[in-house]
Image (cartoon, grey):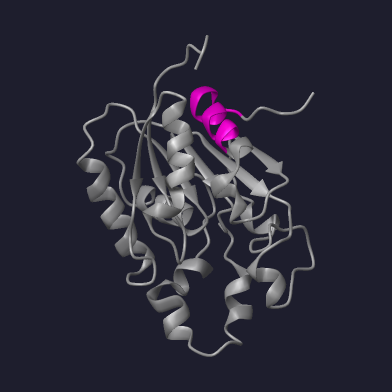
Amino acid sequence: MGDREVKSLNIVLVHGLWNRGWSMAVMAKRLRALGHNVVVHSYPTRAETLAGHADDLYRFLLANKAHELHLVGHSMGGLVILNMFSRYDDLPQGRIVLMGTPVKGASIVKRLEKLPGQNFIFGKSRDNLLQGFQHTPPGRETGMIRGNRAFGLGQIVGGHDEANDGSITISETELDGLKDSIELNVSHSAMLVSSEVVEQVEQFLLHGGFKKGE
């Protein structure tokens, strides 16, 4: 990477609903190309409750012997991370980046209830996406990346009355205790393949703040 001289970070990526580890492949590849050690936690999003997913993530992280470990969660993946830290406090130190995570609950879930086949659509994850969090994990600097490009499933099932990323509204990502936050012109799903998002993720994990415009 030319003259880049940055600390090599240990990073764990956690995907969101209806996805598996493959959905984080582009982000993982780009972060590795920047010199970081990256692993992806893959889990069956509809097959377990939020607490169950958090327990699985906790066991996954315990197997990592790093002294410092940073977590990046997309959408429901961020809820899994927050749930885990609400119940476990013996993991290595590190920062957290949440990307489009509905920390105040996802209103799109209630709109999707109009569609048939709820058990198939959500499985055990429905209540996961309605669960709210009040504050960031104590002692862990946490940043939020929000998208404001309204393109996605939320537009198909009725749209939003406020700024959103196509699935999650800006207000649904508000969380007390955030060290920093930033809005980018990306949709909910496009966050996973955006080079700008990768740049901002690295920036926060290295420095505890996002790179803002001049």
Please, is residue 10 above or below residue 146 in the view? Answer: above
Number of marks: 0
**How far from the left and from the top, in percent, is residue 210?**
63, 30
Q: Is residue 100 left or right of residue 67?
A: right
Residue at position x 45%, y 28% in the image: 33
Residue at position x 30%, y 51% in the image: 57
**How far from the left and from the top, in percent, is residue 138?**
44, 39
Q: Is residue 167 left or right of residue 208?
A: right
Please, is residue 133 above or below residue 73 in the view? Answer: below
For the record, the magenta segment spans: 198-209
Q: Residue furthest bottom?
A: 116
Say whether residue 206 is magenta: yes
**How far from the left and from the top, in percent, is residue 105?**
57, 65
Say whether residue 144 is magenta: no
The reply to whether residue 95 is visible in this rendering is no
Camera-nearest residue between 119 and 110: 119
Residue at position x 40%, y 78% in the image: 123
Q: Please, what is the dominant secondary structure of the magenta stretch?
A: helix
Residue 120, quarter of picture? bottom left
Residue at position x 54%, y 22% in the image: 207
**How far from the left and from the top, in percent, is residue 161?**
79, 68
Q: Is residue 59 left or right of residue 32?
A: left
What quarter of the picture does the C terminus occupy?
Answer: top right
Q: Is residue 171 left or right of residue 88?
A: right
